[in-house]
DNA sequence: CCTCCGATGTGCT
DNA sequence: GCACATCGGAGGC
């Protein structure tokens, strides 16, 4: 067997674009993600190993869910050449379960906004802290590979204070579900 | 475009 | 105890 080189965190993130996340009655196609690279990445929760970040030092394909300011955000732990890498799920296009997603988000949102932003994506999918640690290859939340995502754009990550210029955010070019860029005020 | 702020968990001191 | 955060929505300029 030929030895296989593991991808970098940005490569792993980019490869997730176009994939499907299926769970809790809704499925969506990923349109926007960000790479976080562990100890080499000051913006990553896994920059230091703590009780919260320990899951990212474990096996890949697990869901890392955390709360911030009352919202949930979900990452997939990925196998890379470095330790403790993860990909933040920032936005998606809802494919199935649109009515359920709309009920979870509130009625007055256009379809393109149902899963725009990491907090909103989790709300649309019904992901909470109860999904922390789920194996996306066999758990209640599944990751299914997609086809060619089409043109991909890259730029700095949203809202991070440290390493604010690394172009580790990836999105489908011109897709209406993609969130707006916000630079951290102190970056 | 920008700034503020709710609301809350995490980790450092 | 306390500063800060992978946010989102509202409101001001």
Image (tube, coloured by chain):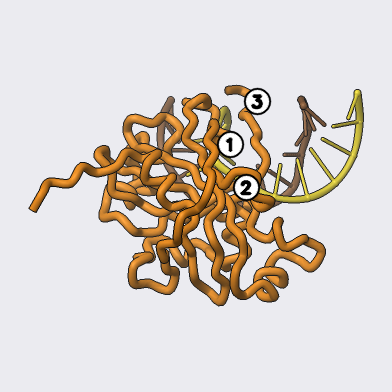
Chain colours: A orange, B brown, C yellow
The residue at the point 35 percent across, 59 percent down is: A62
Q: Is mark 3 on a helix, strand or loop?
A: loop
Q: Which mark is residue A185?
A: 3
Give the residue at mark 2. A69
User: In the image, is C1 to the left or to the right of A17?
Assistant: right
User: In the image, is A93 to the left or to the right of A53?
Assistant: right
Earlier-in-chain disc, 3 versus 2 = 2
Q: Give whichever of A76, A48 is nearer the camera.
A: A76
Q: Give whichever of A26, A46 is nearer the camera.
A: A26
Q: Is mark 1 on a helix, strand or loop?
A: loop
Q: How many labels does the image show?
A: 3
User: In the image, is A5 to the left or to the right of A152?
Assistant: left
Badges 3 and 1, same chain: yes
**Mark 3 vs mark 2, CA separation in Å:** 17 Å
Badges 3 and 2, same chain: yes
Closer to the eye: label 2 or 1: 1
Earlier-in-chain disc, 3 versus 1 = 1
- Whether residue A66 appears in this view of the structure is no
The residue at the point 57 percent across, 68 percent down is: A126
Mark 3, residues whose alpha carbon is within 10 Å: few (<14), some, or many (≥20)?
few
Q: Are marks 3 and 1 in contact (CB under 8 Å)?
A: no
The residue at the point 29 percent across, 42 percent down is: A7
* Residue C9, position as x, y percentages in the image: 78, 50
Q: Are marks 3 and 2 in contact (CB under 8 Å)?
A: no
Q: Give whichever of A105, A180 is nearer the camera.
A: A180
Mark 2, residues whose alpha carbon is within 10 Å: few (<14), some, or many (≥20)?
few
* Residue B11, position as x, y percentages in the image: 41, 38
Give the residue at mark 1. A158
Q: Quadrant of the C terminus of chain A?
A: top right
């Amino acid at each position: 067997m030929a030895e296989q080189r593991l991808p970098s965190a940005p490569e792993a993130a980019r490869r997730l674009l176009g994939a499907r996340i299926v769970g809790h009655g809704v499925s969506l196609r990923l349109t926007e993600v960000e790479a976080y690279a562990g100890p080499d990445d000051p913006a990553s929760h896994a920059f230091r190993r703590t009780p919260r970040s320990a899951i990212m030092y474990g096996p890949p394909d697990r869901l890392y869910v955390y709360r911030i300011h009352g919202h949930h955000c979900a990452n997939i732990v990925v196998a890379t050449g470095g330790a403790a890498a993860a990909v933040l799920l920032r936005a998606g296009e809802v494919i199935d379960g649109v009515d359920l997603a709309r009920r979870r988000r509130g009625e007055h949102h256009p379809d393109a906004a149902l899963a725009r932003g990491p907090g909103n994506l989790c709300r649309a999918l019904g992901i909470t802290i109860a999904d922390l640690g789920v194996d996306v290859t066999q758990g209640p939340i599944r990751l299914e590979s997609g086809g060619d995502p089409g043109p991909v754009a890259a730029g700095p990550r949203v809202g991070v204070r440290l390493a604010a210029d690394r172009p580790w955010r990836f999105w489908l070019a011109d897709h209406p579900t993609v969130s707006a860029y916000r630079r951290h005020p102190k970056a």
